[in-house]
Amino acid sequence: MLRPQHMDQIFAILTASRPDLRFIPGTIPLTPLAAVLPPLTYYLALILLPPFPSHPNQKLISVFRSVLAVIAGALFFRLPLRYHIPFSVGLTYQLALVGLYGGCRVLDAFFISPYLFGHIPRRVKYHQKPRWETPGVWRHRALSNSYYNLHFLQPRKAAVTEIATTDEGLPESWRDRASWALELELAMRGAGFTWTSADVRHSKKTWTPTAWDRVHSILLHVLPALSASFATIRFIYVGDLKGEGDLSLPFDDLSFPKQLLLTAALGGFLMTGFSLAHSIFAIMLAPLNPHPLSYFPPLYTTRIWDLTSVRSFWSYGWHRLFSRLFLVYGVWPGEWIERKITGKSAGEAADVGKVLGGFVSSAFVHSFAAHTVVGGSVGEALGEAEFFAGCGIAVVAEEIVKRSMQRFRRRHKHNVDGDKANCSDRWYDGVVGRVWWIAVLLYNGRHFARGWVKAGLVREMAGA
């Protein structure tokens, strides 16, 4: 039983500021009320989002809903500018992501989507039908792209084909509205709604996981990989970056190989950490099945060793939790700008604007979060922006090279025996692609790692 002195000790821990946390001057420790009000106000507004076609006070409800949405958006945006979490650099960073993501989501749900596109998210129901897998090589190929291989799971149930159907209407009763609003607010990737992000839709072929599958994944694969990443981060930090007192030495004091190793360890830590959290929440909510809240589609949709380009990594190898934000505030504006500059019609592809817009929006989001843990300094938070901008340029460059090589090979349709054939692929393409994307992410990722060392995030991750 907790005694008053125990409560005082817990309160002291939660309110004690880390000496290496450089929060924005003027911000204060996050209060419970400040943490609860934004999502609660957003939820109340969501209940009123579906129209009331036969209600006599429909216009009044619409105005009240918009007022709630504006308040919710303002409260979300205010979070990182007014508050910090004193005992953690990482949680203060996450608070900025939550505030920015939440505010942008509110604007999208209540103003951009309904007024510009006439769209209110509808429920999507998923039906799974058993599919037969041929033993041997074909089964191995199916497994290679399965949820289980991606999350280091061993399948215990049959393979299934997932079919999605969209509801015709929107909720009308208060009970249905309350359930719909809760599901939509918690669906970060839009899973279960017509807001579903592309990574959820990549493949209809999947597996039906069990709680034991996820436990097996955590114990035998995810935790060892996470532990190895943590050990590497701690080894490098304690051995090479730990300065006097609470100071960290500059990232550039590391040798080049150690810079790459630390960057790889940070990436591995994040990837396995996301997978661990994904599996834990899936286990916790599994008893709710078949309720939509128990639906956890694959977090990563391709095994990392099957990726052959920078674009495929960001499209299939990463979690894409912020994909809706990047779509609305990056991809769509980028496509619009490219079409305005080039004169392309609305039906023509605008890939350069799409790619650069998405990465520029990502650069802004992550740099904004970084600036909240470096004392509000914009200049010290540009590492994330440099990383994502570099990745965007790399995607555009590799696409240019890829299309140029395809045109060249079509003009020279000869294989090694001199016979004409469609030789658009070479045996070494995959090798070159893997070396390329790994080199880009490690070399360019040093900007990210440099910023995290400067902000004290690496020190906190190392437990030092």
Image (spheres, grey):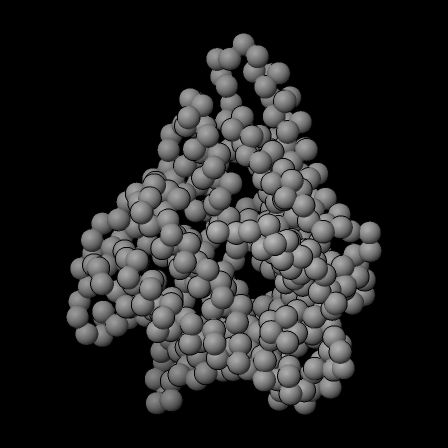
The residue at 73%/86% (across/down) is 253
- Furthest residue in direction top, as rendered: 56
23 or 264: nearer the eye? 23
Q: Is residue 326 visible?
A: no
Number of numbered markers: 0
Is 399 left, or right, of 377 in this rendering?
left
- Where residue 33 sits, quadrant-wise, is top right
40 or 426: nearer the eye? 40
Residue 28: horizontal and vertical position, in percent? 76, 50
The residue at 40%/59% (across/down) is 279
Residue 30: horizontal and vertical position, in percent? 68, 49
150 or 326: nearer the eye? 150
Instruction: Determine whether 226 is above or below 288 in the image.
Output: below
Quadrant location of the C terminus in the rendered image: bottom right
- Where residue 169 sits, quadrant-wise, is top left
The residue at 28%/61% (across/down) is 212
- Where residue 84 sits, quadrant-wise, is bottom right
Residue 175: horizontal and vertical position, in percent? 42, 26
Residue 196: horizontal and vertical position, in percent? 46, 46
Q: Is residue 206 visible?
A: yes
454 or 445: nearer the eye? 454
